[in-house]
Amino acid sequence: MISECSEWQRQIPRSLLGDLTAEEQRALDAHVSACPSCQQERESYAQTLRMLQSAGDEPLPRHFLVYPQESSAKPWQLFRQMMPIWQAATVATAALVLLVGIATVSGLQIRSDRGSWSISLGRSTMSPAIDLAALKAEILQTADEKNRQADLAWVQDLRSEMTQFYTDLTQQQQAQLLAALTALQSRLNSHITLTADDIRAGTQKSIVDLYQAVSLQRQEDLNGLNVRLDKIVEDNEIRARQTDAILETLLQIANLNIKQAGDQK
Amino acid sequence: MWNQDRPLPAPAEYAQENVWVTSSQRGDALAFNRLVLKWEKTIYNLALRMLQDRDEAAEATQETFLAAFKNIRRFRRTSRFSTWLYRIAVNHCISRTRRRPPGTHFSLDDEVQSARPDHQLHVPGMQEGELLCAENRRRVRAALAFLPPDQRAVIELKFFQELTFEDIAAVLRVPTSTIKSRLYTGLDSLKVRLGAEA
């Protein structure tokens, strides 16, 4: 069981980091669910991961800003930062350069002539076989040409890099602009819809107000008309009563006249 | 178990960082220092977990940013700026570890024991949660101190910087299979050490 479990237990950290295929994960889950030893192992790994996850950062002791004059480290600082093997190589190179320098200054000459070697100090009395001035000019020209080509290549690289960067940036800006325009359009649409709804509601309110005002006016007119009609009816009744009274008086007068005429006869 | 849904930086933040990188490449120290302010806490804590010594971590952090400033023109944008910065920092830390005399073992526990008032864990007024967090940090660092530098670097980048296996391979310039091997070996050692302390 133990030897069998060791293979499963090797897969447990991979499982916790999502580094297993779905099939491997299913097989492992099936085994672990039935194996207390592997359950304990998985809990142990999970506990380790939880501890790693909860170990946060410490606060900074200070800021680490860079000042341009600091960035040019002194040679001895660079030397001190080198690994020992590179320090040894640097010392050896410096010693070699020093030796060559001394040899140049002292005019050391090492010659091979027909299988025999000779070393001498001081200027040679033999005329030089090579035109040193022409050689120096050629070397300088070659070095200049090389520097120029290196500069051109650097400028070319820089230009292509900048072009790439600005293209990327432009694409990002275009995407952002498009998103902003879409948002603006949707806002305008909603605004137009809202405005139309407002106008419709306003119109309806105005019509209702107008209808109410007209109705009120009409009601007032009707009331006034009724009052006037009542007044006319009342006046007519008064006039009718007065007419009746006058007629009755006239009749009484007429009866009196007739009675007096009968008496005279 | 492990949270693998690492939140991507916001596009605006990423674009801003790109602008700062471009300005830095033109020699603008102010723009570079904005990058420093953004990344210094991350790099300092990376160095602290790698080197286990606060003074050395501060020196390594400063060296990392100086080296980055000097070489920013060589940053080709084939990766993120943070990936490039992690590479410089990890290389500085590994290089410093290798320069130490054989048998040297640093642990922040030694500093706690050395009665430095600013680094004492039991500061009066510290809340219980902070104490637990500090204690947990101490235990994790003590366990990390026993890992070889290459395993420590992988553990750091995976669990503290939350990089993918591919990103870690890009930072350390080794194959993904090697990264996984170092990670699981290191995790196994951590489990034993942290389990033994619990």
Image (cartoon, coloured by chain):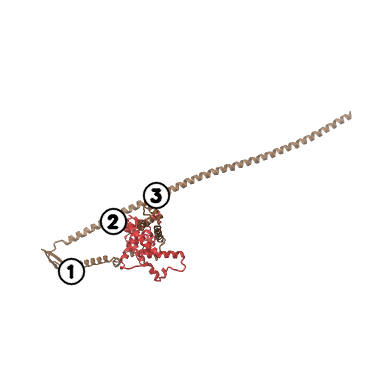
Output the chain of dot 2: A
Q: Nearer the viewer, mark 3 or mark 1?
A: 3
Amino acid type assigned to the residue bearing label 3 in the image: Ala
Q: Are marks 3 and 1 on the same chain?
A: yes
**A95 sits to left or right of B101:** left
Q: Is residue A178 visible?
A: yes
Q: Which mark is residue A154?
A: 2
Q: Residue drawn at (56%, 42%), measured in percent from left and top?
A: A204
Report if the CB atoms under discs 3 and 1 are less than 8 Å apart: no
Q: Secondary structure at mark 2?
A: helix
Between residue A61 and residue A233, name the one nearer to us. A61
Amino acid type assigned to the residue bearing label 2 in the image: Trp
The residue singled out by tag 1 in the image is A106
Q: Which mark is residue A175?
A: 3
Image coords of residue A37 (percent x, y): 39, 58
| Mark 3 / mark 1, whichever is N-terminal | 1
Q: Nearer the viewer, mark 3 or mark 2?
A: 3
Q: Secondary structure at mark 1?
A: helix
From mark 3 to mark 1, how far is it between C-alphas?
71 Å
Chain in red on the image = B
